[in-house]
Image (cartoon, grey):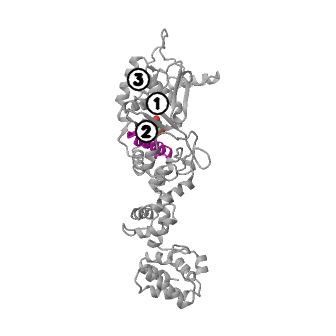
């Protein structure tokens, strides 16, 4: 391949970065990185009513979180209006575009009449110039749109990188609006000018855009611009087999960050939605880049699998650096309303519990007992903190007041206490857990206690 590979992601800033868009971004990014090419970020903000700066910021933040670094951009379409208008002028002059003065009412009436006749609805070409055709008189006070003069005959064919060869006949598509009366271009036109200007060689996007591609190819041709290759990635279906949507759970990358997923796990999981490398389920960013050459993209929809994502995250959590987890768990504790200062959660806290967790939010659930009061259930108290064991618990509290505050000495104090009171380990360890941790099961009790502030342990034991 001699040409430099250039891909892009072109989100519309009308909400969070959707998981589907994030996956397309990931494929585009990995493809560019694999071939040593460039990855471009473009913000498609021409839907002025629905685009927000807040959403732009969330998209940028989510891209950053996932580590999808771009070489150029972000470019904003609303800052390129003059360029689109200049291209429209060229097309008007070349006869590949024309002004259309139909009012919205006329278009509605056109559609109704077509329906009544049982015809396919679409623009009927009344302002389309043809040799020998007399156009209607230009009405006063109507600001025209500009339409693309789509070829009337012939097929549009492309070899889709994901779906294979696709052919659409031009008779099936009408003359689409490329410039609105306010001078703002429509998606199908701006996307072509941008992909051309930005020398994009490969366009990966969701397959909801397949039907737009014939128009876009025709516009590229009308402009004499080189065609990129297109790859339309099938949708992601939710657990219920329907398209992943807000109504059926979290669909934004940011929501998963907030729920305590790690970006490397998310990246790994998203990559496997509609792409595979043999049976590999866990792989690094570097492996993904070295494997992702545009092959092995699935033609069928991918299935979102929350349980699998949880499993992937748990695997990454086990390997994650404990200092990094301490920072993430601190943020999660604060999110849960537990006040912790910056260095209070230590790497040792995270090392002790991370193997039992799916997310950093789970980790924070475990660690909350160190920084906030616990509330053991009445049943567990009644079952485990019996009258018979209370003297031993108080004796342990007294011993713990003086031992070195480290695991081995704590262990010895527990052993001495069970020896003295004729108990078995669980008979003491479980009520200790219930009182100090608020739950009957934890990792090894000496390790768990050693990470507490000594005073907290003694107070909770004595409060029985
Ligand atoms: N703004 C479009 C979208 O978010 C981009 C589609 C494309 O990649 O061409 O769906």
The residues tagged by marks 2 and 1 sit, at their Cα atoms, a distance apart of: 12 Å
The residues tagged by marks 1 and 3 sit, at their Cα atoms, a distance apart of: 14 Å
Q: In percent of the image, x 52 and y 52: which residue is there?
A: 281
Q: Where residue 441 sits: x, y (%)?
A: 55, 73
Q: In percent of the image, x 44 and y 79: which residue is there?
A: 407
**Where is residue 50, by image quadrant?**
top left
Q: Are marks 1 and 3 in contact (CB under 8 Å)?
A: no
Q: Residues within 10 Å of mark 3 (few under 14, many from 20)?
A: some
- Quadrant holding the N terminus: top left
Q: Look at the image and say whether residue 415 sits in the magenta stretch.
A: no
| Ligand 1 lies under 8 Å from the Cβ of mark 2 | yes
Q: Residues within 10 Å of mark 2 (few under 14, many from 20)?
A: many
Q: Are marks 2 and 3 in contact (CB under 8 Å)?
A: no
Is residue 428 shown above or below 14?
Answer: below
Q: Which residues are magenta?
A: 15-42
Residue 276 in view: yes
Is residue 206 shown above or below 336?
Answer: above
Identify the residue position indicated by label 3 in the image.
223
Identify the residue position indicated by label 1 in the image.
188
Q: Residues within 10 Å of mark 1 (few under 14, many from 20)?
A: some
Residue 145 in view: no
Looking at the image, the residue that sits furthest to the top is: 132
């Amino acid at each position: 391949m001699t040409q430099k590979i250039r891909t892009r992601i072109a989100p519309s800033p009308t909400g969070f970065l959707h998981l589907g868009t994030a996956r397309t971004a990931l494929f585009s990014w990995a493809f560019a990185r694999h071939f040593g090419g460039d990855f471009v970020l473009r913000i498609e903000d021409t839907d002025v009513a629905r685009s927000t700066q807040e959403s732009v910021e969330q998209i940028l933040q989510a891209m950053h979180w996932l580590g999808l670094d771009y070489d150029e951009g972000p470019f904003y379409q609303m800052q390129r209006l003059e360029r689109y208008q200049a291209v429209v002028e060229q097309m008007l002059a070349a006869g590949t575009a024309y002004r259309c003065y139909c009012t919205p009412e006329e278009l509605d009436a056109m559609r109704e009449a077509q329906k009544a006749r049982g015809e396919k609805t679409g623009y009927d070409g009344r302002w389309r110039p043809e040799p020998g055709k007399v156009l209607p008189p230009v009405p006063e006070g109507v600001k025209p749109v500009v339409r693309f003069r789509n070829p009337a005959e012939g097929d549009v064919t492309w070899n889709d990188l994901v779906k294979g060869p696709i052919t659409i006949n031009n008779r099936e598509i009408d003359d689409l609006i490329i410039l609105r009366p306010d001078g703002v271009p429509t998606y199908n036109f701006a996307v072509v000018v941008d992909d051309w200007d930005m020398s994009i060689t490969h366009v990966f996007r969701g397959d909801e855009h397949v039907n737009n591609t014939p128009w876009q190819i025709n516009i590229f041709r009308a402009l004499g611009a080189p065609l990129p290759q297109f790859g339309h990635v099938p949708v992601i279906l939710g657990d219920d087999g329907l398209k992943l949507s807000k109504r059926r759970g979290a669909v934004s990358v940011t929501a998963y960050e907030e729920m305590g997923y790690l970006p490397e796990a998310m990246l790994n999981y998203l990559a496997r939605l509609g792409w595979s490398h043999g049976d590999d389920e866990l792989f690094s960013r570097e492996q993904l880049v070295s494997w992702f050459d545009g092959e092995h993209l699935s033609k069928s929809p991918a299935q979102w699998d929350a349980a699998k994502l949880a499993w992937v995250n748990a695997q990454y959590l086990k390997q994650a650096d404990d200092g990094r987890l301490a920072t993430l768990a601190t943020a999660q504790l604060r999110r849960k309303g537990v006040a912790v200062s910056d260095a209070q959660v230590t790497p040792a806290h995270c090392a002790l519990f991370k193997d039992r967790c799916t997310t950093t939010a789970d980790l924070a659930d475990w660690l909350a007992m160190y920084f906030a009061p616990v509330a053991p259930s009445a049943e567990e108290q009644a079952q485990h903190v019996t009258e018979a064991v209370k003297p031993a618990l108080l004796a342990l509290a007294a011993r713990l007041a003086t031992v070195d505050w480290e695991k081995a000495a704590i262990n010895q104090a527990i052993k001495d206490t069970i020896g003295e009171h004729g108990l078995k380990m669980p008979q003491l360890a479980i009520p200790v857990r219930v009182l100090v941790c608020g739950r009957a099961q934890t990792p090894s009790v000496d390790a768990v206690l050693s990470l507490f502030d000594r005073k907290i342990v003694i107070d909770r034991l004595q409060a029985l």
